[in-house]
Amino acid sequence: MRVPARLGLLVALGACSGVSGRAPPGPGAPPPPSAPDVAMLARPRTVASYTLRASLDPAAHTVHGEGTLTFTNTSDKELSELYFHLYLNAFKNQASVFMRAPIGGFRGTTVPKDWGTIDVRRMVWRDGDEARDLWGAAELRRPDDEDETDARVPLPRPVLPGETITLEMEWDDKLPTVVERTGYDGSFHMVGQWFPKIAKLEPDGTFAHFPFHHLGEFYSDYGRYDVTMDVPEAFTIGATGPRVEERVEGGRRFARHVQDDVHDFAWTAWDAFQKRSETIDGVEVSILYPRGYDDHAERELATMRFAIPHFGARYGRYPYEVLTLVHPPQTAPEAGGMEYPTLITTGGAWYVPRSVLTPELVTIHEFGHQYFYGLLASNEVRWPFLDEGLNSYAESEAMRAWRGAGSAVDGLGLSVGGVEAHAALGRQHRHDEPIAQPAWAFATGSAYGALVYHRTATILETLRRVHGDEAMQKALGTYARRFRFRHPTPDDLVATVREVLGERAANTLRVALYEKGWVDYAITAMSSHPARKAAGIFDVGGQRETVATGTPTEGRHEGWVLVKRRGTLSFPVQIELVSEDGARQRVPWDGAADSIRVPFSGDSKLRAATVDPDARILLDEDPTNNSATALGKAAAGAPRTLERATYWAEILMGAITP
Amino acid sequence: MSEPSAPSSAPEATPLALEGAPDALRLLAPAEIRARRRPGAVLLFFAWQLAWALVVATPVHAWAGRAFGSHPDGDAALFEPGGRALLFWLSSGDSALPVTTRTTLLLLVLGAILGQLPLGVLTASLALGRGALSRAPRGAAFGVGATLFLPFTGLVVAVGLAQLLVLGLFTFGGSALDSATAGRLGDGPAFMLRLGAYAIGGAIAALLSVAADLARAAITLDLALRDTRKAAWSSVVHGLRAAFTLPAREKKRAIGAWAWRWAAGVLLVLLGALAASALGGKGGFALAALWLVHQGVVLGRSALRASWLARALRLVPRQADQRESAR
């Protein structure tokens, strides 16, 4: 899911950069595989499979659903109850956990103009010849809690380990106006989280169930989804998985989609969709978009031409046959920027200039979720950074590989990178809360966005810059391949980093994620003077010489620079010493101690010094204290800023007066 | 681009003072009013802009110098591709940001008001001349310019407020139109309606700018032609009345004359932006070259402004014309 704050910053900067932009480069050759020797599971273990039928009434904005759930107890415990997520009830009233959470600063904060509900009409367990009604005993609410998104369903008899059961279900959805990820806007319908969905079964026999929280996303078991949707004939359908059947009967369009090895199913229907399709790297990519968005559609397809092979090399081949991109209408922006298996929603107004790369960023970000949300499927509620954070890093890495330094804004002299935007935004709230905590534990939506998305991406980018591109891609490539379809945890990530990058990197990652780790390198003092000979009596070549105190060494200067490290993180860094004659020398420091006094010796006086001159430590709290100029030496100052500011003041003065 | 000649019915200029003296200061005849004859005044106007822009730039320059000036390469980091330092600088929560922003805005507004003095001097220099060769009025232009300061300032306030009102109304109206029609027409057409509303608002604001300069011309001519001084506000009213009662054909000429110079000015700004894009954040010779290009842009825009004001002085009827048309 995207972060509006970043888009706002980028659009503002882009507006300053003008409307022109360079033509996008072609996809180019993908990078070599990051961890080719790491084995990937070809298929996940199938736990929960659905065969569903859904009928949309676009006038009433309702969906009638029915079908079966086939569920296997893959744990080693007997199950006496099941849990079902009824996500649409988050929009039933303002007493739901979703609506009552006092969370601002993130998307989806508006109260829906039209409420949404899901009402289960029937849930029957076909247990041999017996039909056992389950829904009559279901517990929708907890005591003193109006939330109805997390239903407990007691079982008349336990489900044994390894046993597979089949439940028949029937339900009715009333879609809300688009609030977050799902809903309707006029005749546009984005149908997500729309069916009674069984909670993720953990190996210990417990269910990872939770009420739908404003900041929380999802966590599910893999299975096969066979879904037949019917809508009015004039509507175009986009859905998870390939279409295996389509027909029109009685003025209704029926479309059947079947997809194995996924953990959710979403679909959309609108009578104003335009459509383009293209096969990219063996994947049939379709884009559904509103009228007037042809240029956007091309930009998003161009993004996919780069992204599919690039992500395949980095994190393992995309295993599905299809991918559908949905660009929602401009009046339904909250439906955009969301990921479902083989279906992603993008976004952005049609007039966003090519110099502002938000359509590309959103598209590549949502596609990246196919890996971290789709194929790894970590618990997004318990550890949201494992999806959004890692994916934000992957998105900015891919965008930089494709578009270079100006991967977010690139026009008329202004070049802003996505990585740099992550670093700037990730600084907010960095001392407030740890990153590695559940979504519902964040105090504000802005803290969630800054830490989960941007800070995590900045941590990983810092590790990449410090340890090198190849090593970092190997670490994440190993993680993505090894844990494909396995629902990894933060411990799995840290262990993989330890294995590939070493103990220090793993410890850095752990402290940064769990303990609000931070670092600030600073030059706090420096000194330079003509070199002096050691004074005293010396025996040289059989002669005794006396060197007076303060005798200068011809043409040599010496001095020192005091560099300090503050904070709980440490990285190896370079320290650059600049002499008056322009000579530059670099001194490596492991960066672990609290400070170091770096000696200087040169042909002229020491003029200035910089720690981390290549800006590798993106996590550095304050880059402005990374440099110092020797006392008495004229600082380089800010002549470029003076020139630009003067010029634009002149232009503005000529423009603001009538 | 050629422009239409001054109205053929324009009377000969009325001497301002010391009629008959060889070096008399006089109001020039329309055909004599040309910006190219006053390079000194144009340069002075440009110099004022440069000087005040340096004042406006001082807070942000000081702030950048404090943050990045001690780096061996100075503020080069702020212009590096990727924008890490730039983003950090702008988003770090440094308390200098609001102080710098407010100070800069205040200085810009103050400059807009103080700038009426050099603008008055420029206008006076264009309208007046000495002797038969219409030499530059030099020092006398400062005196007339000082007299024009109050009426010109009144114009800035009155027309500026009107422009803000127009822009606000059309911005609000455009957004409302977009929201009201998006469902029925689709996003693209609805947004085009919004853009259309913005464009109309912008065009009206631009026309008000044209009227303001015509009013400046009328005020200058009025001051040169009459014997007694008017109150500043009376001058503003007189100037605006003269601008708005200009015959339709003259209004069209005025708009055309203003529009091509405005377009040329925009092209110059684009040229400056392209130069900045090409030279990036380099220092040394490249920075000096960029400074020269940018100041060339500003000087070119100053010349265009002077050229337009000269045209406005030629277009606005003088008192004799007004009396004539009143009969």
Image (spheres, rainbow, N blue to C red):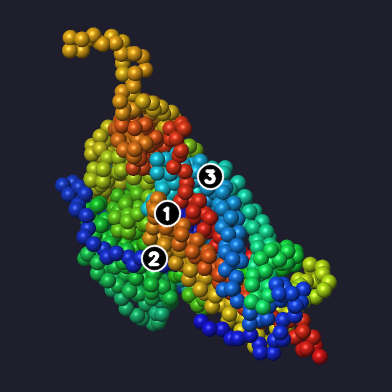
Q: Amino acid at mark 3?
A: Trp
Identify the mark at residue B287; answer none if there is no mark. 1
Q: Are marks 2 and 1 in contact (CB under 8 Å)?
A: no
Q: Residue furthest left?
A: A37
Residue situated in front as seen by the camera: A244 or A127: A244
**Where is mark 3, residue-wise?**
B63
Residue A418 drawn at (x, y percent): 38, 53
Q: Is residue B211 above or below residue A358?
A: below
Nearer the observer: mark 2 or 1; the answer is: 1
Label 3, label 2: how far apart the Cα atoms are: 30 Å
Identify the mark at residue A490; answer none if there is no mark. none
Q: Amino acid at mark 2?
A: Gly
The residue lying at 60 percent from left, 86 percent from top is: B5
Label 2, label 1: how far apart the Cα atoms are: 24 Å
Residue A535 drawn at (x, y percent): 32, 13
Crowding at dot 3, Cα within 10 Å, few <14 / some 14-19 / many 20+, comes out as: some
Are both tags, 1 and 3, on one chain? yes
Label 1, label 3: how far apart the Cα atoms are: 20 Å
Residue A640 drawn at (x, y percent): 46, 51
Quarter containing the N terminus of chain A:
bottom left
**Chain letter of disc 2?**
A
**Where is mark 2, residue-wise?**
A21
Left or right of residue A12, residue B234 in this image: right
The residue lying at 60 percent from left, 55 percent from top is: B52
